[in-house]
Image (tube, coloured by chain):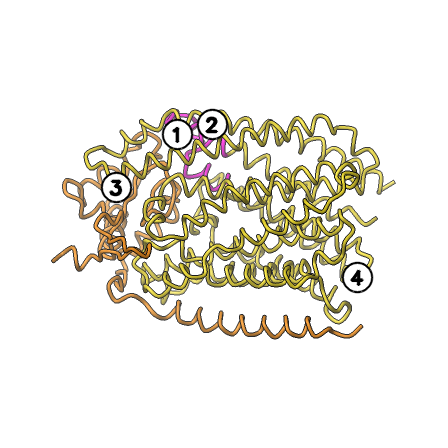
């Protein structure tokens, strides 16, 4: 089994997840104790550390999974191991450069891509190498792709496009018009989330197909209908981020019409898949199954919020509040992370004969993680409701008073953030150990 | 193995979607709303550079977009009792979680120019927006507020 480089992607991804949680908790502490680490790691440094680490987890783990599945596929052969290695070390070197820039307070980018603009060049190059490797592995060699190969290819191409689009602000034509600039920033941001969702949801469908040993899951007309619906959302459904911005009204009308159907897509597919699994299959793939079912719950919760968000009359009250944060935490942790952990534990069961060694610890970790995330999520929703009431129905209260009134919500948010860290550490640390053991063994 | 008719149909449909996406993007990049179609001055762009270089959006929001630790600053410039002196007083104050910045007077003016011109583009929160029966929200524009 070809494992080393894909496993390194996943190991670095899991380290990034641990760092994301650590930076997130430090940043959360500053909500309660304003002077905490203020001189050495102020909030304007901690937040990009946290966000970049969280994005790195999703990207590195999804990418490592794709490389693993393609490298070990019966249908195709990965075009170039060397390109895959260059891709890995390019991303790692760029990651170190970004962390160094943040540590020295060197920013310059827009939200979520706060690093100096030049560092987007090696990131884009990494994605282009990934694209070349991916399409050269498939095009002309495999016809009638199942839907997950379409989704992965689409995710890579659109990631390159939208990451480039996120830097259109470097052109004076865009930059000089603040509203246009802000719209394009959120268009790019919304759509590159859609692009990595293509990679992650593609992985979910791939796993369902492999666990059930049913190739048809990725080949039905319904699967392709949902793929195109998701792609339409990726292309045109971003404007719920900017309903409240005075952009051209047609952009907002269009988004309102098309918005946020992609959750229904995956929810429906996971639901049908769950119904059709035998008890024996569940037993063999216990951890991946647990994580996919957790993703199902989070899709349901976020589906409700997303549908409400897509109605401008409700969006007006939730926009700019912690409800938006709850939604993004629910999607990145609740959906993306659980699907990716399903992928990680599935790969673990393939590469390590010892994978059940830490099963009890990992199940305990899963329970702590999931319970903590539910409370963490609702603390944010309630804080958001309170902020919205302050914004629209309370005229005389200062911002600082409103923040003070949220003290208990922030405390709950922080405590259960610690719970998420403990729960995920119980899953991630043994997995990293086992992956390292597999890599060491393969060298001998 | 030959491509099935389904695969050919999917490829055709993808081509149609990509064409529509190209037209859509061109329109988004080039058309603007006359109500908010203001060009930033050179001074304001320098202010925006400072805004990005110091990662101000980690804590502050413009149009509700950004971090949640500090207040939204979209209309701080034109809010009664706030304005230029108020903004300048805060910049190097290091109050609460706000880092202790060392902006020069010139840099403070650039940041104020940026916030002043952002203020002119619209209103947030849009307290007088009209909620329609269809669920749509008709925004109040800055020009309407001036009247």
Chain identifier matching the orange colour in the rendered picture: B
Pointers 2 and 1 in contact (CB under 8 A)?
Answer: yes
Mark 1 Cα shell of 10 Å, populated few (<14), some (14-19), many (≥20): many
Mark 2 Cα shell of 10 Å, populated few (<14), some (14-19), many (≥20): many
In depth, the one of A223 and A424 nearer the eye is: A223
Q: Residue at x 61, y 75 (%)?
A: B12
Tag nearer the camera, 4 or 3: 3
Pointers 4 and 1 in contact (CB under 8 A)?
Answer: no
- In this picture, residue A245 sits left or right of residue A359: left
Q: Main secondary structure of the magenta part?
A: helix
The residue that label 4 is drawn on is: A76
The percent position of residue A238, horizontal first and vertical second, equals 44, 57
- In this picture, residue B142 sits left or right of residue A158: left
Q: Are dots 2 and 1 on a single chain?
A: yes
The residue that label 3 is drawn on is: A392
Pointers 2 and 4 in contact (CB under 8 A)?
Answer: no
Position of residue B99 relative to residue A135, above or below, is above
- Lower sequence index among marks 2 and 3: 3
- Lower sequence index among marks 4 and 1: 1
Chain identifier matching the yellow colour in the rendered picture: A
Q: Quarter of the image containing the C terminus of chain A? A: top right
The residue that label 1 is drawn on is: A31
Q: Secondary structure at mark 2?
A: helix
Pointers 4 and 3 in contact (CB under 8 A)?
Answer: no
What range of the chain is rendered magenta?
A: A24-50
The residue that label 2 is drawn on is: A414
- Lower sequence index among marks 2 and 4: 4
């Amino acid at each position: 089994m070809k494992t080393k480089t894909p496993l390194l992607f996943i190991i670095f991804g899991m380290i990034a997840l641990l760092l994301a949680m650590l930076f997130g908790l430090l940043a959360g502490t500053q909500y309660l104790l304003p002077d905490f680490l203020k001189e050495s790691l102020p909030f304007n440094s901690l937040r990009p550390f946290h966000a970049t680490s969280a994005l790195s987890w999703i990207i590195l783990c999804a990418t490592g999974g794709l490389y693993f599945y393609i490298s070990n596929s019966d249908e195709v052969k990965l075009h170039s191991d060397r390109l895959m290695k260059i891709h890995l070390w390019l991303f790692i070197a760029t990651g170190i450069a970004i962390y160094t820039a943040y540590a020295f307070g060197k920013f310059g980018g827009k939200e979520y891509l706060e690093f100096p603009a030049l560092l987007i060049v090696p990131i884009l190059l990494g994605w282009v190498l990934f694209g070349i490797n991916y399409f050269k592995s498939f095009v002309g060699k495999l016809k009638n792709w199942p839907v997950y190969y379409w989704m992965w290819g689409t995710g890579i191409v659109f990631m390159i496009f939208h990451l480039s689009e996120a830097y259109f602000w470097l052109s004076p034509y865009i930059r000089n018009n603040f509203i246009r600039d802000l719209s394009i920033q959120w268009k790019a941001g919304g759509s590159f989330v859609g692009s990595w969702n293509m990679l992650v949801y593609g992985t979910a469908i791939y796993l369902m197909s492999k666990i059930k040993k049913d190739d048809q899951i990725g080949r039905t007309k319904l699967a392709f209908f949902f793929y195109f619906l998701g792609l339409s959302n990726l292309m045109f459904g971003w404007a719920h981020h900017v309903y409240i911005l005075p952009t051209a009204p047609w952009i907002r009308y269009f988004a309102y019409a098309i918005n946020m159907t992609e959750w229904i897509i995956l929810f429906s597919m996971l639901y049908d898949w769950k119904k059709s699994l035998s008890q024996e299959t569940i037993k063999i793939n216990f951890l991946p199954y647990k994580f996919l079912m957790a993703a199902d719950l989070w899709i349901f919760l976020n589906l409700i919020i997303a549908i409400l968000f897509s109605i401008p009359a409700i969006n007006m009250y939730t926009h700019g509040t912690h409800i938006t944060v709850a939604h993004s935490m629910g999607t990145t942790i609740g959906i993306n992370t659980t699907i990716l952990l399903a992928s990680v534990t599935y790969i673990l069961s393939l590469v390590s004969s010892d994978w059940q060694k830490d099963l009890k610890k990992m199940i305990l970790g899963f329970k702590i993680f999931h319970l903590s995330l539910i409370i963490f999520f609702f603390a944010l929703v309630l804080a958001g409701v309170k902020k919205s009431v302050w914004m629209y129905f309370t005229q005389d209260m200062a911002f600082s008073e409103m923040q003070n009134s949220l003290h208990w919500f922030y405390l709950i948010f922080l405590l259960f953030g610690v719970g998420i860290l403990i729960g995920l550490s119980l899953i991630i640390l043994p997995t990293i150990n086992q992956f390292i053991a597999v890599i060491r063994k393969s060298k001998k | 193995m030959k491509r099935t008719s389904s695969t050919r149909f999917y490829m055709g449909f993808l081509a149609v979607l990509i064409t529509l996406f190209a037209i859509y993007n061109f329109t988004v990049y080039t058309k603007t709303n006359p109500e908010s179609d203001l060009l930033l001055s050179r001074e304001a762009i320098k202010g925006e550079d400072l805004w990005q270089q110091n990662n101000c959006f980690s804590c502050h929001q413009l149009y509700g977009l950004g971090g949640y630790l500090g207040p939204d600053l979209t209309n701080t410039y034109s809010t009664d009792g706030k304005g230029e002196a108020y903004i300048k007083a805060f910049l190097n104050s290091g109050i609460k979680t706000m880092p202790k910045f060392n902006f020069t007077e010139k840099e403070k003016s650039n940041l104020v120019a940026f916030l002043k011109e952002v203020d002119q583009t619209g209103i947030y929160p849009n307290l007088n927006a009209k909620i329609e029966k269809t669920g749509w929200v008709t925004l109040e524009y800055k020009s309407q507020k001036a009247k």
